[in-house]
Image (cartoon, rainbow, N blue to C red):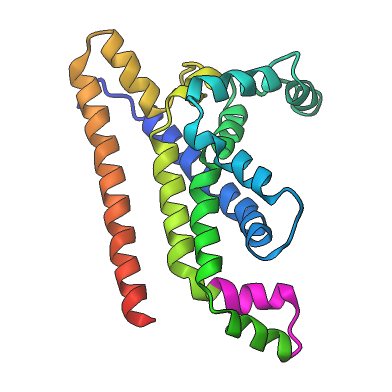
Amino acid sequence: MEGLEWTPLILTIKLATITTIILLFLSIPIAYNLTYSNIRFKSVYEVIITLPLVLPPSVLGFYLLLLMGKNGILGKVWENIAGHQLAFHFEGVVLASVVFSLPFMVHPLISGFKSVPITLIEASYTLGKSKFTTLFNVILPNMKSAILTGITLSFAHTIGEFGVVLMIGGNIDGETRVISIAIYDSVEKLDYTTAHTYSFILFAVSFLTLLTVHKLNRKLEVRF
């Protein structure tokens, strides 16, 4: 594979990994509150979280670009902290990926929280355990399959991102040029050999990721 650049693949894996880790820690409290708390306007919150599933990436990317640009609220704050704007930098692509992939983590976690028998939770409270202890010692261990599903969907979805990444990050080599952008760029140059290679790598990574999770879920089902 002479002439093939590995930087887009490495950058893609880095982006997907960081995004998935952030989403896991961010989505657990969100999903927990949406499942167990009687918060006001719950339906509105759920719709907002679900919006990235139905909004065209160009629309979401456009509004995120306005927020992250030099004149945007987030852009100005970040420039004061880091010395550069969020847009067209890796950090901006990470933030956009978190927003874009949020429902892919939150929805499986909500299903997981709902699947935990309420009797186990009540028994923990009866024994004097706090909500925090119950969450980490009772609830989360009994929804491993849902957590694994959320991690997989978020990781796989981030790997395949194109529209939002292009709107926010552009095509900057070594900074925002992920593998999906590299495929598009290769096709534009009529370099179908490189496009095919990148596409096959992306297909293989996605397939192996889903296959691994499927096998792990089967093992968890047998165990529990």
In front: 65, or 111? 111
How many numbered circles are shown? 0
Q: Is residue 196 above or below residue 136?
A: above
Give the quarter of the figure containing the C terminus. Answer: bottom left
Which residue is at 72% across, 84% downward? Answer: 125
**Considering depth in this image, is 214 or 178 the residue closer to the camera?**
214
Q: Which residues are magenta?
A: 127-140
Res. 37 visible in picture: yes
Residue 166, x across and y down, in percent: 48, 19
Residue at the extreme bottom of the image, as rendered:
127
| Residue 155 position within the rendered picture, expressed as x and y whole percent measured from the top left | 44, 46
118 inside magenta stretch? no
224 left or right of 23 in image = left
Say if residue 87 shows up in the picture: no
Which residue: 34% across, 75% down?
Answer: 221
- Residue drawn at (76%, 88%), measured in percent from left and top? 128
Position of residue 68 measured from the top left corner of the image (x, y, whole percent)? 68, 22
Residue 127 coordinates in the image, percent (x, y): 72, 91
Q: Please check the rendered image and state whether residue 131 is part of the magenta-colored stretch, yes or no.
A: yes
Q: Is 68 on the left-hand or right-hand side of 143?
A: right
- Nearer to the camera, 114 or 84: 114
**Image-based side of 118 in relation to 142, left or right:** right
Magenta part, dominant SS: helix
119 vs 75, left or right, is left
What's the residue at 48%, 47% (across, down)?
Answer: 104
User: Relative to 111, is 115 above or below?
Assistant: below
Q: Report the quarter where the N terminus lies.
A: top left
